[in-house]
Amino acid sequence: MFDPTVFENLKVAFENQLYDLDNLDREIDIVNRVDRLELAVMAREFRLRFTLAERHDISAEILLSASLKELAAEILELKDEIPSCGLRIRFYLQLENADNVCSRIEDLLQRIWGTVSPPAQTISYRYGAEKPIYSNTAEITFPRKINEEQMDDIPELIRHTLQTLHELHEAVN
């Protein structure tokens, strides 16, 4: 009988809660979903991207990943290896004035997410545009791996993500 991996179980837990927020509560709109098996390195990646309902200018993405080593440790039941996955959360937004807004975004992310890890912001723009619009990808990376023991933390993580989306709207508009 097939026994789902930690990756699969966590993926389903995130999907269930986020799709309920989309379909039942109408609090968010899911705008993209990626469920990838990367054959070149035999890794798994799951991404679910969403916006606040009726506010599609800023989006959040939850990324779950498992490397070959992490998947093999579980499937082969290797001793001294704890099956786990990597977790990151990204926020995507457009800015007209990156100099002023990025520091506010960093303060906001640190206040909401605490000392999980310092947020990273990546800014890009189209060269030659008359008035550049900056694309900002702000990322929270969790330094430790997660597994099924953190399943009860998923609702709180989603609440923090929604709070961040709401506050980002206030900070940039």
Image: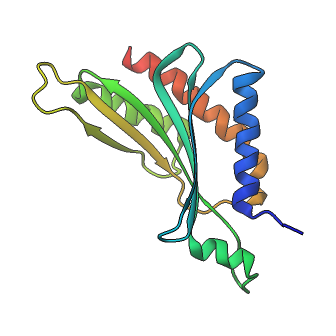
Which residue is at the far front?
39
Does residue 39 sit above or below 31 in this rendering? Answer: below
Q: Position of residue 51 (x, y in %)?
A: 55, 25
- Residue beneath the point at 70% across and 50% down: 11
Does residue 116 sit above or below 137 in this rendering? Answer: below
- Specify the quadrant that holds the N terminus: bottom right
Front-lying residue, 123 or 102 = 123
Compared across the picture, whether 72 is left or right of 104 comes to right
Compared across the picture, whether 140 is left or right of 12 comes to left
- Residue beneath the point at 37% across and 19% down: 172
- Residue beneath the point at 77% across and 58% down: 148
Q: Position of residue 159 (x, y in %)?
A: 66, 32
Q: Position of residue 5 (x, y in %)?
A: 75, 64
Does residue 149 sit above or below 57 in this rendering? Answer: below
Q: Position of residue 25 (x, y in %)?
A: 75, 19
- Specify the quadrant that holds the C terminus: top left
- Location of residue 125 by image quarter: top left
Task: Note whether residue 89 is visible.
Answer: yes
- Location of residue 79 by image quarter: bottom right
- Residue beneath the point at 30% across and 24% down: 95
Compared across the picture, whether 75 is left or right of 88 comes to right
Task: Note whether residue 150 is visible.
Answer: no
